[in-house]
Image (cartoon, rainbow, N blue to C red):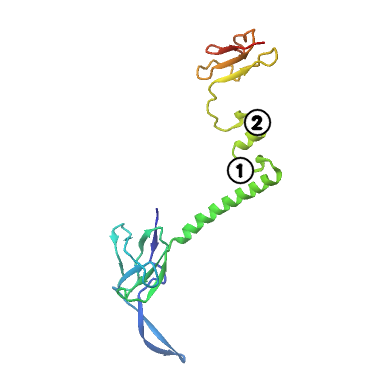
Amino acid sequence: MARHLFGGGIGDYVVAPGGSVTVNGITGEQELLVPGTTVIFFDAIAAGNAITDLLDLLNTPITSVTADVNGAVPQFQGPNLVRSMWADANGGGGPRRLMIATDIGSDLAGDEANIATLQGTVLGLAAVATSGHYSDLSGAPSLATVATSGAYSDLTGTPSLGLQAVVKLGGTWPLRVTTASDISRPAMWIGPSPAPAFGSGYSLIGDVWLDTPS
């Protein structure tokens, strides 16, 4: 599981009202940056539970963060998979302000790439649904070739076939799949006599002949 980064952003400061001021005929409230203030976190705007599973950038466990000499909230790590928290710089008395993880942009970039891949797959499946051909799937794995040709040998990275079964067709023995002697891939010849010839693509050492009625 991943922890997300909080704080250190352009708006991550502890502020307090600093009195009224009039500028160019407009009266408003000044804001003061408050250094050294302890900030605690909750999982809701009101009530809810305190969040204390935090880490600093050195992975040291902390339960709160302290604004620096300029009133800025330093960067820190939130709990696993938490992307937002409610910050309180008044000892738990509120008001609370929502803080969003600063590294969500990286998450979104990865999600967008995954979504694009899924969209490509869905479009490929749409073509399959229309044509009925598995081979129309964009970027289809080797099973698409197998589905088209019916040949297991078209499967990429095929494991060893093991025992080969060679069945006599009419009065003729077909060639075995492999012509080199391989004890891990013997052949079972199934059919009536005469037995298959030895060598030259037919019976090899380790093979077995199962004589069946004519």
| Amino acid type at mark 1 | Gly
Q: Most extreme residue toward the top, as rendered?
A: 194
Residue 88, visible in the rendered structure = yes
If you read the primary sequence from the N terminus, does the residue marked by circle 2 or circle 1 appear first? 1
Q: At 65% from the left edge and 40% from the top edge, which residue is drawn?
A: 134
Q: Is residue 149 left or right of residue 85?
A: right
Q: At 68% from the left edge and 40% from the top edge, which residue is drawn?
A: 133
User: Badge 2, how many Cα within 10 Å: few under 14, some, many 20+?
Assistant: few
Query: Element at badge 2?
Result: loop
Query: Element at badge 1?
Result: loop
> Splitting the image into 4 quarters, where does residue 60 fall?
bottom left
Q: Mark 1 points at which residue?
A: 139
Q: Is residue 212 left or right of residue 159?
A: right
Residue 83's spot in the image, x, y percent? 42, 62
Q: Which of 80 and 172 is in front in this view?
A: 172
Mark 2–mark 1 distance (CA, rounded to whole Å): 19 Å
Q: Nearer the viewer, residue 8 or 38?
A: 38
| Amino acid type at mark 2 | Gly
Any mark on residue 150, and which?
2
Above or below, comparing residue 82 to residue 114 in the picture = below
Quadrant location of the C terminus in the rendered image: top right
Residue 25's spot in the image, x, y percent? 46, 92
